[in-house]
Image (cartoon, rainbow, N blue to C red):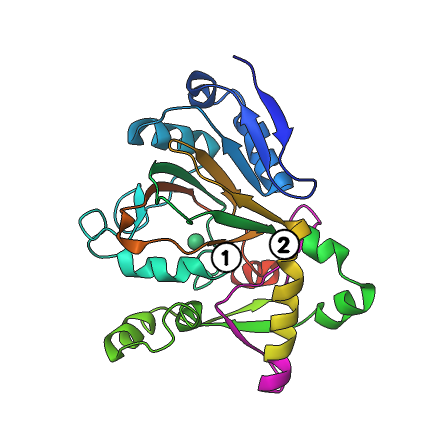
Amino acid sequence: MGFETIDLTPRVGTQIETDVETLLSGSHAAQLRSLTESRGVLLIRGVVMDDEQQLAFTRTLGPVFDAGSGNVYKVTFDKRESPSLWEYNYGNFSWHIDRTDTDTPPFASILNAKRLAPEGGQTEFANTYAAYEDLPEEDKALIERLQVVHKLASSFKESIPDPTEAQLAKWSQHADKVHPLVWRHRSGRKSLITSTSATQIVGMDDAEGAALLARMMAWATRPEYVYVHEWQLGDILIWDNTGTMHRVRPYDLGAGRLLHRTTVVGDEPFDPSRELETA
Ligand SMILES: [Fe+2]
């Protein structure tokens, strides 16, 4: 088989028609990386991949990230599959960029659907490049130099509104971070760093900052920037964690829904000027 691309919406999402051999060969790896960046999320359907193949495919795109539970991370509420990390999945119900508690987040992740819930559980992706590019000029000027505080606890404010002391203690082990609101990428393009982990804008009144963050979040998740993925078993999705946000729609947590995730290490810090400072 060859390698065909079909756009799923005008601004975000492309389906790739190909086969496992082509993916594992790495022959289209550079094109896939570039499509991931330009289209935000890629869907490969009708291809069966086990963990070994998924890891081999991920390696063609870049170095594989160890998620703390090995290289294949189980996205699930099934405690047998994910005994120590299942609780973090509550954060998945809110719009976010992965690992805003780090300076350099993963470049991309790959999800492989192993078990699905009978209803709900669609994964949504919002293109934060397109959202930035469409902002009115006065908003671009307003946010150009703003810095935003991110806290892991905030990632759970919608899904766990009344956390226990133990949960708060666990989340506080992750460092708070300050990131710019506008990501200046090496490519010269810019995207929004919006995420539910964002709590306040540095130097701005709390209420005013929260209102601006909420307005940017609402803008970035307008329907024209969002692709909603209706899962089928075996679907493989690749998303650009540096140019999209994602979240999952509600589903029955007892349904055993299970996605296997592998992740490509990132090489672009949220704040490129900080990279120069520490170089
Ligand atoms: Fe995530």
Residue 161: give x, y in percent of width and height: 38, 75
User: For residue 185: magenta?
Assistant: yes
Q: Nearer the viewer, residue 95 or 173?
A: 95
Mark earlier in primary sequence (2, 1)? 1
**How many residues crowd around disc 1 within 10 Å: few (fewer than 14), some, or many (20 or more)?**
many
Give the secondary structure at mark 1: loop
Q: Please tell me whether residue 178 is drawn above or below residue 28 in the rendered image.
A: below
Disc 2: which residue: 128
Q: Amino acid at mark 1?
A: Ile
Mark 2 and 1 residues: CB-CB less than 8 Å, in contact? yes
Residue 187: give x, y in percent of width and height: 67, 45
Q: Amino acid at mark 2?
A: Thr
**How many residues crowd around disc 2 within 10 Å: few (fewer than 14), some, or many (20 or more)?**
many
User: Is residue 277 something that shows in the picture?
Assistant: yes
The residue carrying mark 1 has its beta carbon less than 8 Å from ligand 1 = yes
Q: Which residues are magenta?
A: 182-209
Q: Please tell me whether residue 116 is drawn above or below residue 142 in the rendered image.
A: above
Q: Please tell me whether residue 199 is drawn above or below residue 232 in the rendered image.
A: below
User: Is residue 241 something that shows in the picture?
Assistant: no
Disc 1: which residue: 97
